[in-house]
Image (cartoon, coloured by chain):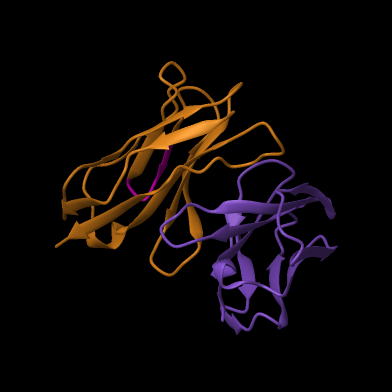
Amino acid sequence: DTEVTQTPKHLVMGMTNKKSLKCEQHMGHRAMYWYKQKAKKPPELMFVYSYEKLSINESVPSRFSPECPNSSLLNLHLHALQPEDSALYLCASSQAVGTQYFGPGTRLTVL
Amino acid sequence: GDSVTQMEGPVTLSEEAFLTINCTYTATGYPSLFWYVQYPGEGLQLLLKATKADDKGSNKGFEATYRKETTSFHLEKGSVQVSDSAVYFCAPQGNQGGKLIFGQGTELSVKP
């Protein structure tokens, strides 16, 4: 099983809202990733967690706050987003270093 | 730094045509190489991979060979179907924490 699940599938939020994206995998992977993808562009890496510790932060604005509560779960907390943050947010997981398996994504619209 | 150059799209083919999508990369060492596919409205799916020189990755009729001498990983399929319409991403995996270096993506449209 190579499934990564993400909830919600769609999210619409205002600029003053606080919301969270969730990602889950049960493959025993120890690395988890958040990517942002704008229309007709490749995914851009935002954060990497390795063994539940944040190992890479690609200079992402503080209005995005990742959290890894355990080895199977990854959250992305959103606060005071801007309309330009509207995008598809993808989660992925892998063994420590190896093939990354992606979830279906959350399509976020910021009004 | 590491980079990848991927054939620009969109590419439009008729069903049963031959497909080639070119991908060349610049990377230190010997990166693993991946092709991902993204169908409309979906996330990325791993299509195939190769981890060392001369390896051939294959899946669903698609193939790509790791060519170290030309630093290339071109994607091919002998006979495309309408259901292959999607965006294809070439992605070497760099040495920095396993980061994927994505190409710009090639949009493929297959007409019946």
Percent of width and height locating residue B65: 40, 30
**Quarter of the picture holding the N terminus of chain A:** bottom right
Q: Is residue B68 above or below residue B73?
A: above
Is residue B82 something that shows in the picture?
Answer: yes
Q: Is residue A73 visible?
A: no
**Which residue is pictured at 84% across the width and 55% down the height?**
A52
Q: Position of residue A65 (x, y in %)?
A: 77, 65
The one of A97 and B55 positioned closer to us in this rendering: A97
Q: Residue B60: within the magenta?
A: yes
The question of residue A107 being in magenta is answered with no
Q: From the viewer's perspective, is B29 left or right of B55? A: right
Chain shown in orange: B
Quadrant in the rendering for residue A78: bottom right
> Which quadrant of the view contains residue A18?
bottom right
Q: Tell me the quadrant of the picture where the C terminus of chain A can be found.
A: bottom right
- At 59% from the left and 55% from the top, the residue drawn is A101
Residue occupying the point 41% across, 34% down: B5
**What residue span does the magenta drawing correspond to?**
B57-61
| Magenta stretch, overall SS | strand
Residue B95 percent location from the top left of the image: 67, 31
Instruction: Say whether residue A110 is left or right of residue A61.
Output: left
Chain identifier of the purple chain: A
